[in-house]
Image (cartoon, grey):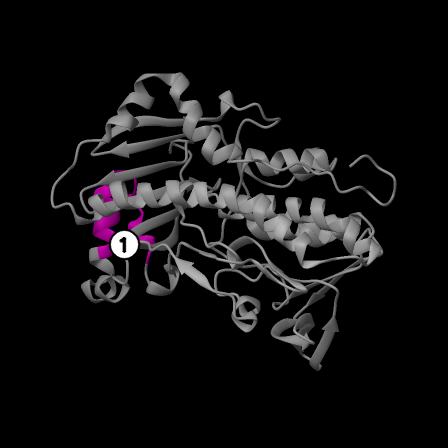
Amino acid sequence: MLGFLLARAGVDVVVLEKHADFLRDFRGDTIHPSTLDVMAELGLLDEFLKLPHQKARNIGVFFGGQQYAFADFKYLPTRCKFIALMPQWDFLNFLAERGKSYPTFHLRMRTEAVDLIEDGGRVAGVRANTPNGSLEIRADLTVGCDGRGSTVRERAGLTVDDLGAPMDVLWFRLPRKPSDPDQSMGRFDAGLLVAMLNRGDYWQCAFVIRKGAIEETKRAGLAAFRERVARLVPLFADRVDELKDWDQIKLLTVAVNRLRRWHRPGLLCIGDAAHAMSPVGGVGVNLAVQDAVAAANLLWQPLKDGTLREEDLERVQRRREFPTRVTQRLQVIVQNNVIDRLLGAGESLPAPWLLRLMSGFPPLRAIPAWLVGRGVRPEHVHAPDSRGAAG
């Protein structure tokens, strides 16, 4: 997204992707109203929504076998009052194709950044591996967008503060039948938590386990895991046998952390490289997009003029650190007061009073809808279109 926005403004950009394509499963696949607003501001929303997707207009949860309404996006002051459930590879392919329409956008696949080029205490680019050998790419600005295990961040020696997470997540998919409900939802009970995303012909499921409990879960056996899933989601009792091998179940090691400083001279980190988010709320991808929009807004002019200073990078951190801190704080509160308690419970717990209140008084469902769907300090596109279109 940042590469697209900067190239759109006339800045020469090279985007590196270490794989041959974007086909990675079990990544963040929720496109929230704040991101859909960005696509609208770029004049791309109608075309974007032609891609296959499902619409989640509200979110409900089952707590101890009883259903509660939680978030309703109809209350949001956004163009799209829903979350679009779309494979992330479709989103990335869409941006890559639109980026190629600008002569200053260069996407290099099968090119993995492995080290930084340093020049007089300043980051001056990256060294990368390609099928044809090593490659050096020099740049006025290097942006680390390489996720929670960021190589760029590690090579830069930036300090990470770990906020902690009590859980990991097992991702898997199960077939969806025409008679199944449409609504994406979560189901919580004593020691058991699962989130279910409606992906059309299948459910994408996130089964929460205690931090580091993957080996214990595997030792108990796949049959025991299937039984736990069926017990929590009776709807799945007739299809959990589709899980025939642990290879069908992918581990997401949950981390919640952030950099103290997101930048060095010539270097900026954004997205998970700057602040790994909890899966709570599914907001990680959308926070990363907001980072990209803010960075493009603040940096396109100094990059184009050749006047970039570290103070410009500091402005990006100041702009985005507040929403990051607020969002992570809310995630940690949910982790510590709901998820951790549930994972350690030996018997059913009552639903939190706030959940019961929101379910009983519909206007209150605007609060979680706002936090999840719009977020703290949503960004708007101000970087121009070098071809003269409105920006």
Residue displayed at 24% across by 31% down: 352
Residue 272 location in percent, x, y? Answer: 51, 55
Where disc 1 sits, the SS reads strand
Rendering coords of residue 100 (x, y %): 78, 54
* Vertical side of 82 occupied by 20: above or below: below
Residue at which label 1 appears: 209
Specify whether 86 is left or right of 306: left
Of residues 323 and 15, the one drawn nearer to the viewer in this rendering: 323
> Which of the pair 157/351 is nearer the observer?
157
Q: Is residue 238 visible?
A: no
The answer to whether 2 is drawn above or below residue 178 in the figure is below
Quadrant assignment, res 126 = bottom right
Amino acid type indicated by mark 1? Ile
Screen quadrant of the C terminus: top right
- Identify the image quadrant of residue 182: top left
| Residue 266 appears in the rendering | yes
Q: Which residues are magenta?
A: 225-243
The correct choice, above or below, for 55 with respect to 328 in the image is above
| Magenta stretch encompasses residue 11 | no
Residue 243: percent from left, percent from top? 33, 56
Residue 165, position as x, y percentages in the image: 32, 54
Say which residue appears at 22% left-offset and 50% top-offset.
228
Q: How many marks?
A: 1
